[in-house]
């Protein structure tokens, strides 16, 4: 799953794109060779964006359902020219989050482009690869933030209690052995033995074996888990609630089938 998701971002859109060079020359390169600062020409018939770019010429109609789930096309306008003094805009620095209306995000589909002065529709590349909005989305799936579950807190607390009990037993054994004038080697072995009895060394191995076994059972029915520790938490669930889909990611809707009511059921 890790490799598949990683490859999806690394080579999700290896397409040929047109880039403006010196003296208004247009050169075709692979999207994997794009770097921030390149001036990309958006084709008239649209394209799937291979990177995050900010519009500097013309306007675009974009379908952002891949990122937002909203199937309604969004109009993107060109970034205001900073050389023209706009009131209150003098010191403003470009940010993809702040200037969403002017930014074409990676993975979104440009449906149509418009230009009014006969010029090409151009956009400056600002982010590529895992730095793009789509890349960050996949990265959050690949490397989820550690979640603080009550089960883990209770497990650590339980282990700490065992360690405390083992510590008391350890100290008592040493004092008792010294008073009985036993050999140093015997004292060390007996004292450490108390710790291994109280805190079982096989506990993490047993937990891991349980997770591995659960993973195998899930794999047989086609269920994959990126964070195996969550399987333990799933065992604590009594009820799972699903929200409605919110917005449909397609314009059309197909009737799959109907469920008849029989005997009031």
Image: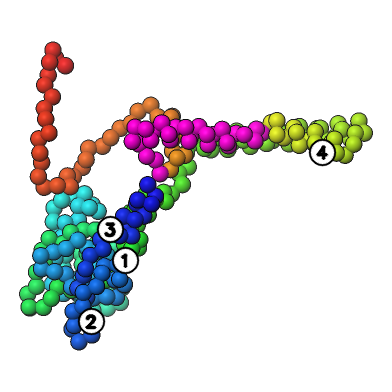
Residue 103's mark? none
Kindly report the distance in space between the C-alpha atoms of the residues bearing marks 2 and 4.
76 Å
Name which of mark 1 and mark 2 comes first in the sequence.
2
The mark total stands at: 4
Which sits in the foreground, 202 or 121? 202
Q: Secondary structure at mark 4?
A: helix
Q: Main secondary structure of the magenta part?
A: helix
Look at the image and give the residue range highlighted in magenta: 199-226
Seen at 20% across and 56% down, the residue is 64
Label 1 near label 4: C-beta < 8 Å? no
Kindly report the distance in space between the C-alpha atoms of the residues bearing marks 4 and 3.
60 Å
Name which of mark 4 and mark 1 comes first in the sequence.
1
Name which of mark 2 and mark 3 comes first in the sequence.
3
Q: Residues within 10 Å of mark 1 (few under 14, many from 20)?
A: many
Seen at 13% across and 69% down, the residue is 43
In this rendering, position of residue 142 left or right of residue 95: right
Q: Residues within 10 Å of mark 3 (few under 14, many from 20)?
A: some
Q: How does the figure colour the protein chain or chains?
A: rainbow
- Return the x and y of residue 13 as percentages of the image width and height: 25, 61
Residue linked to disc 1: 128
Seen at 22% across and 37% down, the residue is 244
Label 2 near label 1: C-beta < 8 Å? no
Residue linked to disc 3: 12
Q: Secondary structure at mark 2?
A: loop
Seen at 50% across and 32% down, the residue is 210
Kindly report the distance in space between the C-alpha atoms of the residues bearing marks 1 and 2.
19 Å
């Amino acid at each position: 799953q890790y490799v598949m998701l990683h490859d999806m971002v690394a080579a999700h859109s290896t397409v040929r794109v047109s880039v403006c060079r010196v003296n208004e020359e247009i050169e075709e390169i692979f999207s994997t060779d794009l770097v921030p600062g390149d001036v990309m020409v958006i084709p008239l018939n649209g394209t799937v964006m291979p990177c995050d770019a900010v519009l500097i010429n013309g306007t675009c109609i974009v379908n952002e359902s891949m990122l937002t789930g909203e199937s309604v096309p969004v109009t993107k306008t060109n970034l205001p020219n900073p050389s023209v003094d706009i009131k209150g805009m003098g010191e403003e620095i470009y940010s993809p989050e702040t200037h969403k209306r002017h930014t074409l995000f990676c993975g979104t589909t440009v449906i149509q482009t418009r230009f009014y002065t006969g010029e090409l529709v151009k956009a400056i590349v600002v982010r590529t690869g895992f730095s793009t909005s789509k890349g960050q989305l996949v990265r959050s799936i690949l490397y989820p933030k550690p979640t603080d579950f009550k089960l883990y807190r209770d497990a650590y607390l339980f282990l700490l209690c065992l360690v405390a009990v083992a510590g008391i037993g350890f100290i008592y054994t040493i004092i008792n052995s010294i008073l009985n004038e036993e050999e140093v080697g015997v004292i060390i072995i007996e004292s450490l033995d108390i710790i291994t009895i109280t805190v079982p060394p096989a506990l993490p191995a047993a937990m891991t074996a349980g997770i591995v076994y659960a993973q195998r059972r899930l794999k047989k029915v086609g269920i994959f888990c990126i964070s195996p520790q969550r399987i333990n938490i799933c065992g604590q669930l009594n009820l799972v609630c699903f929200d409605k889909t919110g917005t449909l990611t397609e314009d059309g809707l197909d009737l799959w089938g109907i469920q008849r009511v029989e005997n009031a059921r």
